[in-house]
Structure formats: structure tokens, C-alpha cells
Amino acid sequence: MNDNNIAQTKSYDFVQRIIKLYQRLPTSNREYVLSKQLLRSGTSIGANIAEASGGSSRADFLNKITISYKEARETSYWLRLLHDAGYLTSTQFESIHKDAEELLRILGAIQVSTKQTS
């Protein structure tokens, strides 16, 4: 279950970026829901990876990694929506979305390797 060290590091760095982005987004009521959803899903990725590290079984580990993967997909969605709605520039979007896609690849690989060794 040591496969998640890179996931822990990358997700922690990603969460820092999500928090900084959230702080820079407008605070109008119209947009608040979008930015709050981004913050929730983005921070949940790392939290679930941390929980996976303390998993009581391989199944528990896989479950938390799967939740992290789903949260990363949701975060990708919110980032695309914020970009398409004009809240993120293309440069901002491409940079942070690239990190989200990298996390998705890492988490997907962890899921596959965990299932294969079960």
C-alpha cells in the first residue's frame, strides 16, 4: 500500500493550489456555489488518500482511493465549468487542470494495481 506516497504528495500540492484559487475567485452570491463545490471536492481528494493510508484492509484502501478518484473527476468538472463561465483564464485553467488530470492518472493506476494484487 506504499503506492500512494506520490498520490499523497501530489494531492497535497494540488489542494494548496485549489485553496489559493478559491481565495482568488469572486465572492459574489452567483458564483459562491461553484467555488465552494470546487473547494469541497478538491480538498476531499487528499483527505481520502490520507484515509486510505490508514485503511484497515486492502478493500478499505481501495474504497478510499476510489472515492479520491471520483472527487478528482468532480474537481475537473468544476474547473472546466469555472473556465467556461469566464471565472478562470485559459492559462489558469490549463495549469491547474493539468494537475487534476495527473492525479486522475495516478489514482487510476493505484486502483488497477490494487485490484490486480487482491
Image (cartoon, grey):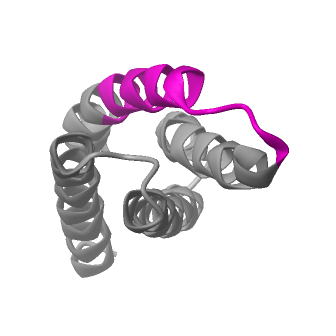
Above or below — where is 84 with respect to 82?
below
* Residue 25 lies in the magenta stretch: yes
Give the farthest residue toward the right. 29
- Boundaries of the magenta span: 11-29
| Lateral position of residue 19 relative to residue 90, left or right | right
Image x and y of residue 74, in percent: 52, 67
Q: Nearer the viewer, residue 80 or 66?
A: 80
Estimate the x, y position of residue 6 in percent, counting from the top left. 20, 35
Instruction: State yes or no: residue 5 in magenta.
Output: no
Left or right placement of residue 13 versus residue 98 in this view:
right
Residue 2 shows in the view = no
Asked if residue 31 lies left or right of residue 11, the reply is: right
Depth check, front residue: 34 or 50: 34
Q: Position of residue 70 (x, y in %)?
A: 50, 69
In which quadrant is the C terminus drawn?
Answer: bottom left
Secondary structure that dominates the magenta span: helix
Image point (59%, 60%), residue name: 60
The residue sitting at 15% across, 43% down in the picture is: 91
* Residue at image coords 18%, 66%: 109
How far across and down, in percent of the image, does residue 22 sit? Answer: 56, 30
89 or 112, which is in the foreground? 89
| Residue at image coords 57%, 21% | 23
Task: Count every numbered label the image shows and give the total.
Answer: 0
